[in-house]
Amino acid sequence: MSAESADKPIKDASTVIVLRETEASLQTFMLCRHQQSGFMGGAHVFPGGKVDQSDSDPAWKGRVDRSPEEITERLGEADADRGLGLLVAGVRETFEEAGVLLASTAEGADLETARQQLHDGASFLELAEALDMKIDAMALVPYARWVTPKMESKRFDTRFYIATIPEGQSASHDGSETTSAVWLSPADAIEDMHAGKIKLAPPTVRTLRWLAGFDDVESVIADALSQKPPLVRPRLVTGDRGWFLALPGDPEHPEDEAALPGATRMVMDNHGAWVDAE
């Protein structure tokens, strides 16, 4: 029996997995969402958020180095305008939440001031014009697409991108929507979840497990580019033996073909960690 409730509006969103290499390991930047946040409060997440209407403004076409059709084709989707908005949203949210601008600017641009202006309500498009911003669409590599299950109070159709932190830039939390930040190796993030130090959502867990199989950014990107971004629509299922999250390919999921390698069921253990289930 499904525990999912009535359909709720689904909003487009973008998440960016920002990576860097250190002498010790590959690391990803993670933010801790405010405890009072209406979605994933207290969880450690990658930078991201919903797509705003302004992210699809036609004026962005002159500030992105690929056509909307090319951008959407990389996502494996059909709506050209949607692809442009998702890309811009990924850049905007990463700058706002992490202070990392995945775009070039005029020489001497003051990114710290621009970020503060964005927090204060300035238009991202107007900031782009003032900074002479140019977005390299190839710098954000599509990785996966997750749709929030129906039982959640807020639902998002989120495209996950991979990006390398630009040379000379540093990342930090915004002090508003997020209260702290940390660079972690994927394996350490998973270990911290099992130790009860951090809380992670299922898409984050599966992404970190995937990342843990690589030693460098180049290998991560090559693997992501080798296939169409998988579409994952989890389904909450309950029964006599409890509940679990079914992924595509599971007998209790309407989609027969697996979208991801590995287990097709996830459950939350007694410590609040998401683990694979048989």
Image: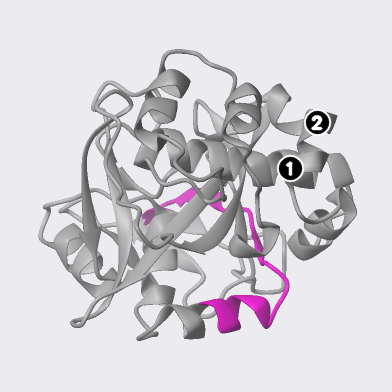
- Judging depth in this view, the residue of 209 and 117 nearest the camera is 117
Q: Residue furthest front?
A: 107
Could you classify mark 2 by the number of other residues whose Cα lies within 10 Å: few (under 14), some (14-19), or many (20 or more)? few
Residue 109 within the magenta-colored segment of the rendering = no
Q: Residue at x 85, y 40 (%)?
A: 81
Indicate left or right for 11 with 270 as reference: right
Residue 222 sits in which quadrant? bottom right
What's under tag 2, amino acid-wise? Ala
How far across and down, in percent of the image, does residue 1 sit? Answer: 57, 47
Could you classify mark 1 by the number of other residues whose Cα lies within 10 Å: few (under 14), some (14-19), or many (20 or more)? some
**Discs 1, 2 touching: Cβ within 8 Å:** yes
Q: Residue at x 53, y 16 (%)?
A: 122
Q: Secondary structure at mark 1?
A: helix
Please name the colour scheme applied to the rendered image. one colour
Q: Which residue is mark 1?
A: 63
Residue 232 within the magenta-colored segment of the rendering = yes
- Judging depth in this view, the residue of 272 and 121 nearest the camera is 121
Highlighted magenta segment, given as a residue range: 221-243
Q: Which residue is mark 2?
A: 59
